[in-house]
Image (tube, rainbow, N blue to C red):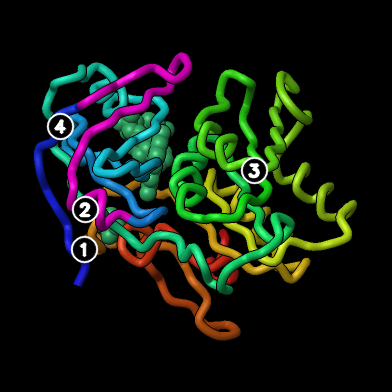
């Protein structure tokens, strides 16, 4: 059975990465040892329901949360200072399987597609995968590009797309990825993706039509975080014309790319 920890941790560092984006660091030896890429924590954000955040990096016993300040909870969190206490609950959910097809040998084999803050979970996954691949990363503008340090250190090929053309190619990351596939002699053998739902839906369509296997990490509004309230249920395929509901918080957030039945 999965082991969760609910505990107060002391914030070791809390820095602004870019305006509106912050990185929060704390230490917890057992949580750090048990956390897997794609899993998340519920943080006390001063709101009735805690807020979910992916574990974005683990170095030794230090855990990092990389987040965007968007509303009441993240604003409250962003005001916490080094030395303040924070109540955390996790690690929750089913993370990525980093070696579904055994060890990879060629960078062309592995592709990550990230949209917005979806980069946070892929960053931790990149820490765990020894061979670099290609990262396609889409953001609204160059001022929304975060979390590339791990990919740069590990010598990944990075292809940026921004909607306003302030960095990399202009347009959506899904279009950049599709263009790459049509001009590429070798299709990627495996893909991991995290980001907004419309992006994941399009990525799934592209992968399925090109025979590319992979996993996607979904975001839904999370309440209980442990599969009890069913508030985060999504439709998943069982057989032709059959489906069951699975929860993003407990069965996911990571699912096989063929599993989700998109609205
Ligand atoms: C499994 C999971 C992992 C996540 N990991 C990260 C992460 O690593 N970094 C990061 O920046 N964000 C992450 N998010 C999104 C993050 O949880 C939301 O941004 C946060 O809950 C917003 O809280 P708030 O109180 O500031 O916003 P609110 O005031 O509650 O809402 C403001 C806006 O944010 C939307 N929103 C609220 N909750 C969510 C949610 N759960 N997902 C998406 N949009 C939401 C609302 O619909 C509204 O439009 C994750 C979400 C999930 C489900
Ligand atoms: S949030 Fe309650 S079941 Fe997922």
Query: Which circle's residue, 3 or 2, is located before the other in the chain?
Result: 3
Distance from the alpha carbon under mark 1 to that under mark 4:
24 Å
Q: Which residue is mark 1?
A: 228
Query: Which circle's residue, 1 or 4, is located before the other in the chain?
Result: 4
From the viewer's perspective, tell me whether residue 36 is left or right of residue 163. Answer: left
Picture residue at 14% right of the left edge, 21% below the top: 83
Distance from the alpha carbon under mark 3 to that under mark 1:
39 Å
Magenta region, residue range: 12-35
Indicate the position of residue 165 as horizontal and vertical percent values.
75, 22
Local crowd at mark 4 within 10 Å, few (<14), some, or many (≥20)? some
Picture residue at 63% right of the left edge, 59% below the top: 191
Ligand 2 near label 1 (Cβ, under 8 Å)? yes
Question: Label 4's element?
Answer: strand
Question: Label 1's element?
Answer: loop
Q: Are marks 1 and 2 in contact (CB under 8 Å)?
A: yes
**Is 195 covered by the magenta stretch?**
no
Query: Which circle's residue, 4 or 3, is located before the other in the chain?
Result: 4
Q: Which residue is mark 2?
A: 224
Distance from the alpha carbon under mark 4 to that under mark 3:
34 Å
Q: Which residue is mark 3?
A: 156
Q: Which residue is mark 4?
A: 86
In the picture, the quarter occupied by the N terminus is bottom left
Question: Label 2's element?
Answer: loop
Local crowd at mark 2 within 10 Å, few (<14), some, or many (≥20)? some
Split into quadrants, the picture shows ligand 1 in the one at top left
Local crowd at mark 1 within 10 Å, few (<14), some, or many (≥20)? few
Q: Are marks 1 and 4 in contact (CB under 8 Å)?
A: no
Indicate the position of residue 107 as horizontal and vertical percent values.
70, 55
């Amino acid at each position: 059975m999965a082991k969760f920890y609910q505990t107060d941790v002391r914030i070791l560092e809390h820095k602004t990465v870019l305006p509106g984006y912050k990185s929060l660091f704390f230490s917890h030896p057992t949580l750090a040892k048990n956390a897997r890429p794609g899993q998340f924590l519920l943080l006390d954000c001063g709101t009735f329901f805690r807020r979910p955040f992916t574990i974005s990096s683990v170095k030794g016993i230090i855990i990092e949360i990389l987040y965007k300040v968007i509303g009441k909870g993240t604003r409250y969190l962003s005001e916490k200072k080094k030395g303040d206490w924070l109540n955390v609950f996790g690690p929750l959910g089913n993370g990525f399987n980093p070696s579904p097809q055994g060890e990879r040998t060629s960078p062309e084999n592995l592709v990550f597609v990230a949209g917005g803050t979806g980069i946070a979970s892929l960053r931790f996954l990149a820490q765990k995968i020894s061979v670099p691949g290609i990262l396609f990363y889409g953001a609204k503008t160059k001022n929304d590009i975060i979390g590339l340090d791990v990919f740069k250190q590990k010598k990944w090929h990075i292809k940026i797309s921004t909607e306003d053309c302030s960095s990399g190619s202009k347009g959506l990351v899904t279009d950049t990825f599709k263009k790459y596939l049509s001009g590429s002699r070798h299709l990627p053998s495996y893909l991991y993706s995290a980001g907004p739902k419309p992006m994941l839906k399009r990525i799934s369509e592209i992968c399925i039509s090109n025979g590319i296997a992979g996993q996607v990490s979904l975001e839904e509004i999370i309440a209980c975080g442990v599969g009890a309230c069913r508030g985060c249920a999504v439709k998943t395929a069982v057989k032709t014309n059959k489906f069951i509901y699975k929860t993003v918080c407990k069965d996911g957030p990571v699912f096989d790319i063929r599993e989700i039945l998109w609205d």
